[in-house]
Image (spheres, rainbow, N blue to C red):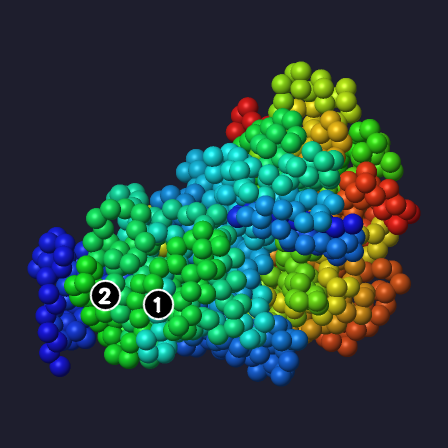
Amino acid sequence: MNIAVLQFPGSNCDQDAFHLFASGLGLPTRYLWHKETSLGSADLVVVPGGFSYGDYLRCGAIARFSPVMGAVREHAERGGLVLGICNGFQILCEAGLLPGALIRNSSLEYRCMTCDLVVEEAGPAFNTRLVGKRVRLPIGHGEGNFRIDDAGLERLESNHQVLLRYADNPNGSLSSIAGIRNEEGNVFGMMPHPDRAFERFHPSQDGLAVARAVLSLRFPDILKESA
Amino acid sequence: MKSAELPPNPDPVLNQPITPELIKKHGLLPEEYDQVCRHLGRTPSLTELGIFSVMWSEHCAYKNTRPLLKGFPTEKRGATAAFGRVLVKAGEENAGIIDVGDGWAIAFKIESHNHPSAIEPFEGAATGVGGIIRDIFTMGARPVLLTNSLRFGELDSPVTKRLLRGVVAGIAHYGNCVGVPTVAGDVYFDRSYEGNPLVNALCLGTLRHDQIRRGKATGLGNPVYYVGAATGRDGLGGAAFASKELSAESSSDRPAVQKGDPFMEKLLIEACLEMMAVPGLVVGIQDMGAAGLTCSTCETASRGGAGIEIELDQVPQREAGMNSYEVMLSESQERMLVIVQKGREREIEEVFAKWDLHAAHVGTVTDTGRMVVRHHGVVVADIPATALTDNAPVYHREARRPAYLDRTSAWTPEGSGLRDLDLEGARATLPRLLALPTIASKRWIYRQYDHMVQHGTVVLPGSDAGVVRLRLGSSEKFIAIKNDCNGRYCYLNPRRGALIAMVECLRNLVCSGATPLAMTDNLNFGNPYKPENFYQLKECVEGLAEACRYFDVPVVGGNVSLYNESPEGAIDPTPTVSVVGFIEKEAHITRQFARAAGSRLVLLGGAPTELGGSQFLGAVHGLKTGDAPAVDLDGEKRLQDYLLGQIRKGRILAAHDLSEGGLLVGISEMLFGTEKLGAEVDLSGLGSLRMDALLYGESQGRVLVEVAPGDLADVAADASLSAVPAEEIGTFRQSATLSVATSIGTLDWRVADLRSEWESSIERAMKRPGLG
């Protein structure tokens, strides 16, 4: 099982995501510079948080054109796992790998805090042990207000593509949506940070369970390790 | 020696004769201009005049404060070979560096951006953060945390709200994007800062000893590189701007405020650290902060005992037709000067190409000791580098004790017939104090800062000190950091107020389980040419120095910001200190929030007895008077040593220092954690004191601790051995109330009501209708 963490100019949670998988789960993890055009042998590509290209124009709008994103798209089309966290979620939406868009928080302010999240029944991809439970994950974003048109929302709900909902909506997201998956179930995006919830001194260690849930689609055994 | 006149500048505008008006406009006194001519052996060109004016400004030269700052201890007496040594001292470089063992070190420094923030709060505060981050990574350190220290006028004023909103958004914009967590801070609101807010930002970075870089130009013929953002006309003369009082015309100085680009800074951090990791490539490096290209060239040349020649045609420029005056004085952000080992030019160029950044070969290190600037091939400035740095003027200003001190220090509650609180008054005061913006929760502020990025934040903002885990290679270490300064105490008694700033900061660190290591200070004062202001400055510096010597906490760097005045007068003297502490074991990390029902509340240091300078006097009686609370250095040291000992023995569940608002505010704040506890407190045994002073006075050297019943006897016995007063005053309960028995009756509050006053006071004030 190999993890690749992308690095765009302006990524700043790349180390956090790296350590979630490398230190938290003990998995082989490496960084991948955005100018690369091949993912090598990555099973899971993590698009980390930060301010890729300064979030100029729109969050994620420039990063989607980075050379590495072509390889990410092919990887996703082949059924490979992709996880976008925070700015990574925004990039995946801009790249069309996930539906919807993330706009300015309704408060018009950045929010850094720890949120309670409800794990939704999201098909075989992201459920197993977490469904119906609450997890606590930090957020840190100015633009996490999830938006999608009515038909799109209907599709997300009827396909069980919503992964996480805020218990107490911090940013105005439609239907309190904090994280989603694509229809096929191999591309995940979430505003909350599992990469800030894995050390013993973090507000929770729920990031480990979320990371395992993402990997479990291809590597079901990973859930046994945490049993 | 009479030097040859310079050839005409390529831009005719710069060839005008130097008139007394021009000299005055550049903030130089006639006698300073005479010194300029003596250094040059001729009259300066306009470009040179501009260069002298920024380098001899207070901001760059500390010309009014240098003699005072010499009183600070710069080394740690009790440092061991492996720990606590000062590796780079105050004043040597852009930031001081302290050994934290195992071959690792930390670099940290605080700096002000007060004047720009007063004029343009968002960009002013944002570029303040950017500047201090550059001071840290230029030393070779990776920035790992930020803190800030802010002062504003009273929050009921719309001007203050605009400034607070802008400053916080600016800090958030820059710090969040660049990916360095803002883990702690302090904010006070007081009328004296109306129109002249203080924005002090601190950055701390980590590095290995062998990664320490210096801002030195050495090695004849070594190439000088300019890296980072292109130069524009923004921030022209910002250092000189920071060295005068704010006036109604200040808003016309807006071009002197720079504009920041945190994305560029993030790239610059990564590219510079990557470049510095290449063995032997970088000879010297310095950021272009205040006074931009001018300061970085002459300071690196001066430190290296060398000269530098640069050609401005090679400087990346984002505006057409800039002349030499503009390029040399621009304070465009996110730029660095790098001296590279000759013959290895390709290596630096490759690193910067990877990050899509400029790396322009602008000049060469010489052995002339002179800073020579060419534009279009013509020499436009030729100045001995040390004339701009070491040989800048130094003044001993006149100090005069301000007359108001006779009145305020003689004040007593009895003398002025101040009626003590009755039961109802005592009850009504607590929620009122908790809602004072200075005391209330700063959640509205810190939730806008990313305080968790880099996943090392252990104690989140809102407790006595920020605690961060440092990942150092394969090992980890824990540090605590805290800023402090109550300007009101410094106004009422400058020397003692500064002592309090320092000892309270240390007390906060000890409450978090940390041993104080080293300090950086930001001296925010009024115009030093007014003898009363200079008296405050002098007394405060001496107070800080005394505390530093007493507690063996060296000063490793800092910043001086003078001329903090608005048309209403000078700010309260504000010598902000920031101290870093080291936590031996993770288990020692202690928070201020009570953890267990049934555990006991113990007051260390004795009952508070003083009212002078308290928030209570200000809020309830409208008075800013009295003497600052007394400081007993010996007692303080005993208290702190004892408390740290008890924490290390695992006997302290929570610890909280008493500060603004006094005893009941302190007890209440212990209840505002996640455990939702109440408390039953009995103060009737503390003697018959004035109720207002006991409940809301701000006597120093007091700490509240939470102790499990089983540890109580040991805690008391050790306190008695250490001669630290320790009084068991209550019990934490699984209840919704705080009840306090006093000699005049029992006071009760619902904890949820108190919490709501404290937690949402600033949020309510800053609420914008219609926004979620």
Residue B126's label in the rendered image is none
Between A83 and B419, the residue placed more toward the observer is A83
Residue B373's label in the rendered image is 2
Where residue B648 sits in the image (x, y, percent)?
77, 69
Residue labelled with disc 1: B224
Between B58 and B631, the residue placed more toward the observer is B58
Residue A202 drawn above or below residue A146: below
* Residue B40 seen: yes
Q: Earlier in the sequence, mark 1 or mark 2?
A: 1
Q: Chain of mark 1?
A: B
Quarter the C terminus of chain B occupies = top right
Question: Which of the two discs, 1 and 2, sits closer to the camera?
Answer: 1
Q: Residues within 10 Å of mark 1 (few under 14, many from 20)?
A: many
Where residue A167 sits in the image (x, y, percent)?
74, 31
Left or right of B295, for residue B182: right
Quarter the N terminus of chain B occupies = bottom left
Q: Amino acid at mark 2?
A: Val
Q: Are marks 1 and 2 on the same chain?
A: yes
Q: CA distance from mark 1 to mark 2?
A: 13 Å
Q: How many marks?
A: 2
Between B557 and B287, the residue placed more toward the observer is B287
- Please report the residue visible at 35 percent of the width from the left and 51 percent of the height from the top: B230
Residue A43 drawn above or below residue B537: above
| Dot 1 and dot 2 residues touching (CB under 8 Å) | no
Where residue B160 sits in the image (x, y, percent)?
44, 40
Numbered disc 2: secondary structure: strand
Residue A126 drawn above or below residue B510: above
Q: Dividing the picture into quarters, in which one does residue A189 lie? A: top right
Left or right of B704, for residue B62: left
Residue B90 drawn above or below residue A118: below
